[in-house]
Image (cartoon, grey):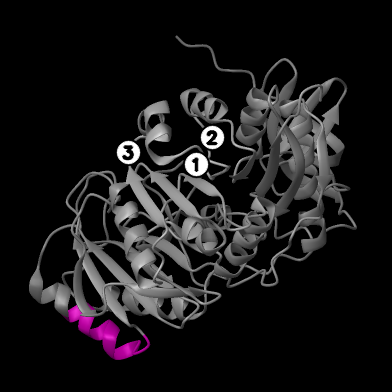
Amino acid sequence: MTRKKKPFPILEEVEITDVAAEGKAIAKVNEMVAFVPWAAPGDVVDIRLTRKRSHYAEGNAIAFHKYSEKRAVPFCEHFGVCGGCKWQHLPYEEQLRYKQKQVTDTLTRIGKAPIGEVLPILGSERTTHYRNKLEFTFSNKRWLTEREVASGIEYMEMNALGFHIPGMFDKVLDIRRCWLQDDVSNRIRLCVKNFCLTHEGYPFFDLKNQEGFVRTLMIRTASTGELMVVLAFFREDQVLREALLEHLLEQIPEITSLMYVINGKRNDTLTDLDIELYCGKDHLIERMEDLQFKVGPKSFYQTNSEQAYRLYDVVRKFAGLTGTETVYDLYTGTGTIANFIARKARKVIGVEYVPEAIEDAKVNAQLNGIDNVAFFAGDMKDLLTTAFIEEHGRPDVIITDPPRMGMHNDVIDTILKASPEKMVYVSCNPATQARDIERMSVHYEVVKIQPVDMFPHTHHVENVALLRKKTEGS
């Protein structure tokens, strides 16, 4: 007979004092730190602990004795349940303050190196409708909110088209209105959902049992006004598929690219599948200054177009190019940064591990008449070698924009051997950026940093750091 675990205690009337790096609020009780979601500094709450360790705990606020003066009223009906936009209860100015603090604290604590100039974070002019891409999931087992469960009502309609509940692979929150993308996105999602609910033969996907018909929906918008929709089906049924696609075209005439894919795999990734064009073009065009960028259904493009321009402009200014430099753009993706800075450089070498992204990069260079760039696909730690640098020339400047896990040690070693005069390090994860900077601190110093907010109402923040090679004796 197993012994029942003793329930964790409830901590009463605890004041929230700060915000943690991952977006949760912080309370301190005696010598223990408690992490609490959905709370704001200045709140006084009762906390029901859900996890307890020697020096920290996690829990949920179950009662509010006092609301912080720093609170804002969340604008989305799904706040507190949906996994996104977790900082809606904080005024945007406070969000920016905490993000700036997160970057500087992380770099000084983990990087253990002096930071030169710390520039004020660049906030987003648009704090809603700023994303150019959203992906929704169909599910026949929608997530019931605490209020719905407490009502005791037996809900018969369990289909959902929305976002995954964090940590629940087979549970999806049905979204009525999302504030992240242009409102045409809501119209498309609801149009598709209502058609599938009111016509026979369109069962929503069962993620656990891997059965159903309609599976995922991707919507991409462009600053040029172009609009792409990609519907994924679990199996092919031409009659049913075309009926839905035709209805969508009739109801949403703004669509410029309507595509579909048959995905019979056990996961929702589309990168290894053939995406078929049903109507319109197979891509969108994004513009940045006088440059055009072709964006296909599998292309990576920064999801906040306006802030992406500001981010790349910071990169270009930090690089301080005069037209004589050889620049390496590591983790180049679809070559957006490489093409953006090419006219200020003698030569740009872009390296990326995704072959399809490199093909996009080459197309974008041709599209803009840029002939001083070269792109190479391969695993960064295997491709970026001393032999590669000898063949293509030692870089005067390295720009690196790695994924969240940061750079591999072998890549850092090669960069140090290449010994560029300066580096511009773009990161979506200040912790791994700080770790990598610490590894390079023997030879490089941080001249200045520029945080950029790409995702309002979330704890995520982008940071650009300018590193300069140390002189002897420094």
C-alpha gap between disc 2 and disc 3: 17 Å
Q: Which residue is mark 3?
A: 378
Residue type at tag 3 = Gly
Q: In the rendered view, would you say 340 is above or below 473?
A: below
Magenta extent = 243-254
Badge 1 crowding class, 10 Å Cα cut-off, few under 14, some 14 to 19, many 20 or more, is few
Residue 241 vs residue 280, the one in the foreground = 280
C-alpha gap between disc 1 and disc 2: 6 Å
Assess whether residue 250 is covered by the magenta stretch: yes
Name the spot of residue 307 as percent of width and height, x first. Answer: 62, 65
Q: Which residue is mark 1?
A: 403
Lateral position of residue 189 relative to residue 340, left or right: left
Give me the residue at 25% from left, 85% from top: 247
Q: In the rendered view, would you say 366 is above or below 255?
A: above
Which quadrant is the N terminus positioned in? top left
Q: Are marks 1 and 3 in contact (CB under 8 Å)?
A: no
Q: Is residue 50 visible to the viewer in this orientation of the structure?
A: no
Q: Are marks 2 and 3 in contact (CB under 8 Å)?
A: no
